[in-house]
Structures are given as C-alpha cells and as structure tokens.
Image (spheres, rainbow, N blue to C red):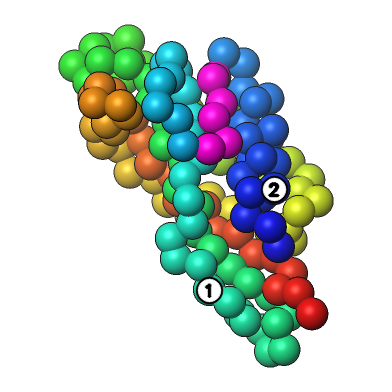
Amino acid sequence: MNIATVMDEMGAALATIAGLNVFPFSANRITPPAVIVGWPDPLTYDATLQRGKDRFTLPLYVVVGKVEARSARDRLAVYLDGAAAGSVKAALERHTFTTCDSVRVTEVRVDAVTVAGVEYLGAIFQTDVIGPGGS
C-alpha cells in the first residue's frame, strides 16, 4: 500500500466538503478553512500473517480561523459533526477507497494548531487505515 496514494485519495474524499481547502501533503501556507493530511504515526507492518495487511494512523489537521473567534468555533463544529454535510468523518467514511481496504475516523481533539508560525483554532482527527501489505 502506497502511503502517498492513500493521502491523495483521502484528500479527494475531503474535497467533497464545500468550501474546505484540502492539502493531501504538508503545507507551508494555507487559507482557512483547510485540512492537511499528515504523515502516518505509527505505521504497523504485517498486521496479519505473511504480509497480508498493513495498518497506520493518519492525522488530519483541520484549521478554521483565529483561536478566539466565535465564527471559528461555529465553523469547526460543522466539521466535527459526525453526520452533517460538512462532516470530516462522514466524508471519509462514505468514500469508496481504492487504495486501501478501510479508513475509519477513530477520534478527534480540538486544539490550537500552528501552521507556518500562525496559530489557528482547529481539530486533529485520527484515522485508522488498513490495506494490503504486499507480497
């Protein structure tokens, strides 16, 4: 399973959320609201015998605006909703992935997220990815 293609496909799934700027890679400059697909931590090889499955956690960093702004709070609440049209969880879990077997949002934490020295109100979503290990 190629991590870069999984990151790209996650970006494509998240691009279905209207108005959300998507970066399926590390970004030095962003315009909120935005989501950045992070690198896996950890990556577990051989989750099943004989290279059957690999598993990793990909963090998603969603940033919406100034930490103290009420409008940022309201916008972030839509992305945190488990089923709304702007839901990060719903966008990922309704997408049919071709690069891996399963993508599931396991948790989210609201926090200040710093990108290129700028602090934003944001959330860090943890996703559990399972896919073919190889031969």
Percent position (x, y) of residue 18?
62, 16
Residues marked 1 and 2 touching at CB (< 8 Å): no
Q: Which mark is residue 5?
A: 2
Eyeballing the image, is 13 above or below 117?
A: below
Q: Nearer the viewer, residue 78 or 130?
A: 130
Q: What is the secondary structure assignment of the residue under circle 1?
A: strand
Question: Could you tell me which quadrant the N terminus lies in?
Answer: bottom right
Q: Is residue 72 left or right of residue 99?
A: left
- Can residue 121 be seen from the camera position used here? no
Amino acid at pointer 1: Thr
Q: Is residue 134 left or right of residue 79?
A: right
- Residue lying at 55% horizontally and 59% vertically, measured from the top left: 128
- Nearer the camera: disc 1 or disc 2: 2
Residue annotated with mark 1? 44
Percent position (x, y) of residue 114?
27, 31
- Residue lying at 56% horizontally and 26% vertically, measured from the top left: 22
Q: Residues within 10 Å of mark 2 (few under 14, many from 20)?
A: some
Q: Nearer the viewer, residue 20 or 36?
A: 36
- Residue lying at 25% horizontally and 15% vertically, measured from the top left: 66
How far apart marks 1 and 2 lie (CA) works out to 17 Å
Q: What is the secondary structure assignment of the residue under circle 2?
A: helix
Question: Could you tell me which quadrant the C terminus lies in?
Answer: bottom right
Residue 72 falls in which quadrant of the image?
top left
Percent position (x, y) of residue 125?
44, 44
Q: Residue furthest left?
A: 68
What range of the chain is rendered magenta?
Answer: 20-25
Amino acid at pointer 2: Thr
Percent position (x, y) of residue 4?
63, 49
Q: Which mark is residue 20?
A: none
Eyeballing the image, is 37 above or below 31?
A: below
Residue 2 falls in which quadrant of the image?
bottom right
